[in-house]
Image (cartoon, rainbow, N blue to C red):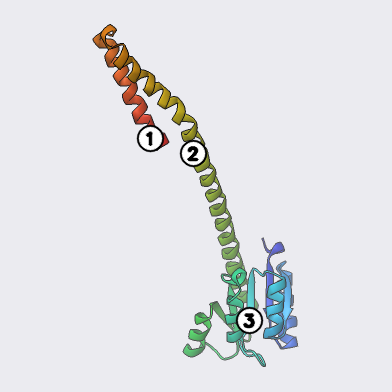
Amino acid sequence: MTSTSRILLIEDEPMNIQALSAILKQEGYQISVATNGKQALEVVARVQPDLILLDVMMPEMDGFETAALIRQRERSLYTPIIFLTALGRSEDALFRGYHVGAVDYLVKPIVPAVLKSKVSVFVQLKRQSELLEQKNIELNAMLQELEAFSYTVAHDLRAPLARIDGFSQALLELQNDRLDEEGKRYLHRVRAGTAQLSLRYVT
């Protein structure tokens, strides 16, 4: 699964970029790097990542503002964003992060095992969500085909059912004197059956 998973790393410190990229590449992820918020938006527009690692403290545009702008793009509305922070887990920072769409935090210095574990979990969740969405699309397409088929069947049945009912009614009215009770009963059953089919499949 990781061989085709794309991670966007948004970080302005070269040493952190090198260290985090090395860890993730060992796991088989494809890594894109942005060193500021503006560059991150350009990368997101060009490459649809499966997960974003976003540094909170960056010059000009911080991580919170960057995340909010990323979330404005429809394609990135549900892309997991993990914040990277050296500020610890303060309540204000956590609230701001979750408010703009973060799914989790990693506190610097980042433990490689924790990074690998969290990235793996959220990438898998993203992929499962995409598979579920695709299944829903396929199911909706099947339902539309079934509705179209039902409409076609109903349309094709309308004329023959009307003819059967019309002939039955004509026999009852025009040949009533020649029909015995059993024959009349059969014709009434035919008319009742065509009426039932019309209600079920045609109307």
Residue lying at 53% horizontally and 81% vertically, measured from the top left: 100
Amino acid on which the number 1 mark rests in the picture = Arg
Q: Is residue 190 rendered to the left or right of residue 177?
A: right
In this picture, is 187 found above or below 32? above
**Mark 3 or mark 1, earlier in chain:** 3
Q: Distance between the residues labelled 3 and 1?
A: 57 Å
| Crowd tier of the residue under label 1, counting other residues whose Cα lies within 10 Å: few below 14, some 14–19, many 20 or above | few
Q: Which amino acid does label 3 sit on?
A: Leu
From the viewer's side, name the closer residue of 40 and 115: 40
Where, quadrant-wise, is the N terminus in this rendering? bottom right
Q: 42 or 54: which is nearer to us?
A: 42
Which label was assigned to residue 151? 2
Vertical order, 163 against 4 (above or below): above
Contact check, label 2 and label 1, Cβ < 8 Å: no
Residue under numbered circle 1: 200
Q: How far apart in space, not on screen, are marks 3 and 2 (Cα)?
A: 51 Å
Sooner in the amino-acid sequence: mark 3 or mark 2: 3
Determine whether the residue tagged by mark 1 lies in a helix, strand or loop. helix
Q: Nearer the viewer, mark 3 or mark 1?
A: 1
Residue 135 located left or right of residue 44: left
Q: Is 69 located above or below residue 200 in the figure? A: below
Q: How far apart are marks 2 and 1 (CA)?
A: 12 Å
- Residue plotted at (61% across, 87% down): 56
Q: Which residue has dot 3 on it?
A: 54
Quadrant of image for the C terminus: top left
**How many marks overall?**
3
Give the structural element (helix, strand or loop) at label 2. helix
Q: Give how far across and how far down residue 130 sits, in percent.
A: 59, 60
Residue 74, percent across and down?
A: 59, 70
